[in-house]
Amino acid sequence: MVNDPYCEADRTNEMSKEMVNKKLALLLDPEKADLSRLPITESCRPDYIFVGGSTGGDPTDFIRALKEKLSNDKRQTTNDQIPIVLFPGNSSQFSPEADVILFLSLLSGNNPEYLVGQQVKSARKIKESQLDFVPTAYILIDGGIETSTMRVTGTKPLDPNDIQTIVDTCIAAEMMGKQLIYLEAGSGALHPVSSDIIRAVKKAVSIPLIVGGGIRTPEAMNAAFDAGASIVVIGNHFEDKPEELEKFLTAKRSYSAAVLQQSGLTAQRSADERFMHLALLEAEKALSANEIPIGCVIVSENRIIGRGHNLTETLSDVTAHAEIQAITAAAETLGGKYMPDATLYVTVEPCAMCAGAIGWAQIKRIVYGAPDPKRGYTVYAPRTFHPKATVTAGVLEDECRQLIQEFFKSKR
């Protein structure tokens, strides 16, 4: 039996790191959004754009107009990296023009039409489109007003004072295989989901939390982050005051910087950047071979024990990803398949396949540069790593993303 190298200090440190990697989503309702007022620029970019609403139909024309708006904006040079996420209110609100769809089930209501009925109606066309989807538990919590979701679905929200029922609903969602939990106070809510609720749910489940509804200030956003939200979604407020998007993004960056400073991760970041530079050198090798430029190094006791870069075209092997090549090399160096003292550095978020290999190798720490919101493990396999493994995201993110972007631009 392999000795477990992890300790309680690792858990505390991981909690601090998780607080840094928070995301802000801009929600656009095709029936209400004015794209001419969309304030996205190179320095003012949300992490996601959610598209959807409780009413309305096919959003294809809206998404196409959104993409055209972004691509024509001379101030924007990286707009294609903002994932467009469908947030549907019913089965008609589907479009293959999006990047991913939240496959929602309204678990807080007792209406079978929105538990499974609408899902059955949309399942075939989603599958045939090959659009990425994420099974998501949608949980409506009373925000002080009657929302359009309540009227359309004929359901009541959960009582915000009954935290036990809210937590039990979220536990059930995870046990049913949902990959995300969306805690929603409702469009135009008077009161956002409370920190006490978010904190209690975060403690009870291991899947990521999305929180939306009634968030009107950067302080309210950061409070949701602090309590455990992975993604905060804001719609109505930015419809009324689109110019405030930059203020919220600035506050999010300041929040992450403060967490880094308080948790003492600055020194670790410096070491991480040094090894990520070496992973980027591996990615450059892939680029020279006309491969998708992703590189990886594995480090143990401050020395590199394995290197690798993408070789799928060279070897005609779909499994020849950078992480797989590096794990194989590290196993040869160590003379064994387990790496419980190792840290893996990779320039792009691992896919589900590579995450599985990393988990089987028992690698204790994973560091990646650019996120992959379409194919990354956080979408398809968020619990694949060793249960006590820690993850750091966004190290040299800009450099890692730029290398990928330049490669794909050269192919157009």
Image (cartoon, helix red, strand yellow):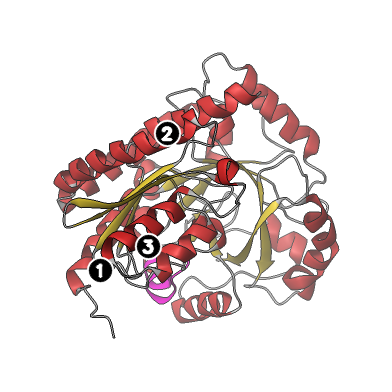
Please state if 172 lies on the left or on the right of 397 as rendered.
Answer: right
Examine the residues drawn in magenta and state their main secondary structure.
helix
Q: In the image as oriented, which residue stretches furthest toward the bottom? A: 1
- For the residues labelled 1 and 3, the Cα–Cα distance comes to 21 Å
Packing grade of label 1 (10 A; few <14, some 14-19, many >=20) is: some
The reply to whether callout 2 and callout 3 are in contact (CB within 8 Å) is no
Whole-percent x and y of residue 375?
Answer: 57, 50
Observer-nearest residue: 255 or 193? 255
- Where the C terminus falls, by quadrant? top right
* Sequence-earlier tag: 2 or 3: 3
Please state if 162 lies on the left or on the right of 55 as rendered.
Answer: left
Q: Is residue 45 visible?
A: no
Q: Which residue lies at the image location 49% right of the left edge and 22% below the top edge?
A: 41
Whole-percent x and y of residue 5?
Answer: 21, 73
Magenta stretch: give its range. 198-208
Q: Quadrant of residue 338?
A: bottom left
Observer-nearest residue: 231 or 77? 77
Give amino acid for label 3. Answer: Ser
- For the residues labelled 2 and 3, the Cα–Cα distance comes to 47 Å
* Residue 205 among magenta residues: yes
Give amino acid for label 2. Answer: Lys
Give amino acid for label 1. Answer: Arg
Observer-nearest residue: 131 or 352? 352
Q: Quadrant of residue 252?
A: top left
Q: Nearer the viewer, mark 1 or mark 3?
A: 1
Helix, strand or loop at mark 1: helix
* 245 over 160 or under it: above or below: above
Circle 2 residue: 285
Q: Which residue lies at the image location 25% right of the left edge and 39% below the top edge?
A: 273
Circle 3 residue: 195
Circle 1 residue: 11
